[in-house]
Image (cartoon, rainbow, N blue to C red):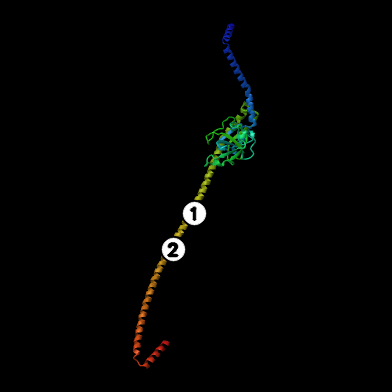
Amino acid sequence: MKKSLLKNNFREISKNKRRFISMLVMAFLGVGFFAGLVATSPDMLDSLDKYADKSNFYDINIISTLGITDDDIQAVKNIDGVENAYGIQTKDSMVKIDDKESVCKVIEYNENVNTPVVMAGRQIENNNECLLDNAIVRTGTGAEKYIGKKIVLENNDKDSDDNDIFTEKEFEIVGIVDSPMYISSERGNTSIGNGTVNFYIYTKDNVINLDYYTGMYVTVAGAKEQVTNSDGYLELVNPVIDKIEGIKQEREDARYNSLVDEANEKINDAQKELNDKKAEVQKKLNDAEKKIKNAENQIASSENSIKNGEAELAKKKQETEKTFKEAEEKLEQAEEALLQKEKELNSQKEQMEFLPQEVQEQIKKRISRNRKS
């Protein structure tokens, strides 16, 4: 039975030699490819692990929509198994390079974690220097084209407080780097520009001026000695992740309460300032009303004085007119009496003319003595 089966198999093979050889070659290729993957996988993992160790690649990445504080970092550092924790600040911004606008992620440089590898140029030394993403160089003519050029951060929104975040707005490119944070060509999404980050730059750690960290990178004790993502590595890292999850709610509540307290403090300060301004305005209004009332009282008093003066003047005028009239009447009476006396005198003079001369002399002497006496 077996001999017959073998004969039939050889007969079929001899009839279809090309098909058999093709299938045999495909089988050898498949086995060879699989054997190659099995053989190179440890080498690839080893290369990845060495690159991660060289760049101090993080073991755990923590992000928060409310930002991360120094207290959060200290709380993570206190967890058993955590080697260290680093707060990092990043900020997306519109930039201009070669008169072209792009969206750039500005990252503060930290030599202790996720350290970028300088591919060309040198390390940054001053606040107005930066390291440029190697991805943008690969699409151009090389590093020489970019080193020495200027990158200018532009206002994302003229009415936004984001414009005060950066202590520097213009940077000179002094080096080209590869970052362990960006293995693929994707640079992430953003809320500005066209919604996509085009490249990143590294700056000194005091260029971004936020009062919180945008991310936290954690290294686990002993993880560096393990191959990245191996079973031994995960056995070290996963328990630490669970412990961090255990304090998550506590830290979230602390951050939320801190922001609420800060907002309430600002509201209270603003309310106090408003109350002070209102009190100041009210005092000015009260003083103005008091001055107006005093002025009105002075006007009323002046009006009364004027009225009293007018009445007194009218009274004096009447008295003066009466006195003047009485004086005129007395003057008229005196004039009439004087006229009467003149008439009598003239009459006496006429009578004297008929008297003897001697008698007239005697009368004149008597009149003269009467005047003297």
Q: Nearer the viewer, residue 261 or 228?
A: 228
Helix, strand or loop at label 2? It is helix
Image coordinates for residue 78, horizontal then vertical, percent: 62, 35
Nearer to the camera, 342 or 242 = 342
Mark 2 near mark 1, Cβ–Cβ under 8 Å?
no
Residue 39: numbered disc: none
300 lies left or right of 253 = left
Query: For residue 108, which quarter of the picture?
Result: top right
Question: Please, what secondary structure does the residue beneath circle 1 have?
Answer: helix
Q: Which residue is mark 1?
A: 284
Instruction: Say which label, 2 or 1, has the lower sequence index.
Output: 1
| Residue 278, percent from left and from top | 49, 50
| Quarter of the figure with residue 18 | top right
- In front here: 309 or 135? 135
Q: Where is residue 283 drawn, in percent x and y?
A: 49, 54
In the image, what residue type sits under mark 1?
Answer: Lys
> Up-down: is 61 above or below 351?
above
Q: Is residue 176 above or below residue 339?
A: above
Name the quadrant of the C terminus.
bottom left
Residue 357 showing in the rendered view: yes
Q: Which mark is residue 302?
A: 2
- Residue 250 is at least partly visible in this image: no
Disc 1 packing (10 Å; few <14; some 14–19; many ≥20): few
Separation of residues labelled 2 and 1 (CA atoms)? 26 Å
As displayed, is residue 254 above or below residue 7?
below
What amino acid type should be assigned to the residue bearing mark 2?
Ser
Residue at 63% x, 23% y: name it. 40
Q: Position of residue 148 (x, y in %)?
A: 62, 37
357 horizontally vs 191: left or right: left
The quadrant of the image that shows the N terminus is top right
- Could you tell me which residue is drawn at 39 percent across and 91 percent down? 361
